[in-house]
Amino acid sequence: MNNTVEVVADIAQPIAEEKGFRVVDIEYVKEGKNWFLRIYIDKPGGVDLNDCAEFNELVSQQLDAIEPDPIPYAYYLEVSSPGAERPLKTEEDLELAVGRYIHVSLFEPVEKENVYEGTLQELTDEKIVLEVKDKNKMKEVEILRSNLSKARLAIEF
């Protein structure tokens, strides 16, 4: 994590806790000639536009008050929901996903498959258990955590 993201995290985390939000991710990236500071927040039931605007204002005020300025370039501050199919990057993300429909990519195939979508039934230090549809029936698939390449929330169709 770069220094800018760490500084922003130190500012955003207490604000999020006070307002009942959770900081899901922070990015500081250059796209074309512009810099973007993106903060993704969530809360039970999801966030709306007013939540994002309020959080943006509070973080912006805190950042503007720091001397010297911790962000050396002009940038756009964006605060948003992480989205319906957001990545599951942290242990907390996975814990909160138990009981939800997710998509996982694997390093090595399990039962000849490298990709699964299903409901996360169980999460331990060593494995996850997904309930997946196999033709017309449901089955459970155990996947070692060390075999997880990527995981994200998914929309069930």
Image (cartoon, rainbow, N blue to C red):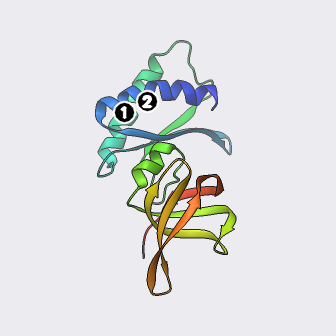
The residue indicated by pointer 2 is 12
Q: CB atoms at circles 1 and 2 under 8 Å apart? A: yes
Image quadrant occupied by the C terminus: bottom left
From the viewer's side, name the closer residue of 60 and 27: 27
Please state which amino acid type lies under the numbered disc 1. Ala
Q: Residue furthest bottom?
A: 136
The residue indicated by pointer 1 is 16
Q: Image point 40% across, 24% down: which residue?
A: 61
- Classify residue 64 as left or right of residue 19: right
x and y, in percent, of residue 113 in the image: 64, 73
From the viewer's side, name the closer residue of 114 and 52: 114
Cα separation, mark 1 vs mark 2, equals: 6 Å
Image quadrant occupied by the N terminus: top right
x and y, in percent, of residue 21 in the image: 34, 39
Q: Image point 32% across, 36% down: which residue?
A: 54
Q: Image point 40% across, 56% down: which residue?
A: 98
Q: Image point 54% across, 24% down: which residue?
A: 7
* Other-residue count near label 2 (Cα within 10 Å), few / some / many at <14 / 14–19 / ≥20: many
- Classify residue 77 as left or right of residue 1: left
Tag 2, which secondary structure? helix
Tag 1, which secondary structure? helix
How many labels were placed on the picture?
2
Image quarter of residue 60 = top left
Q: Is residue 9 above or below residue 108?
A: above
Image quarter of residue 14 = top left
Q: Residue furthest right?
A: 108
x and y, in percent, of residue 47 in the image: 33, 48
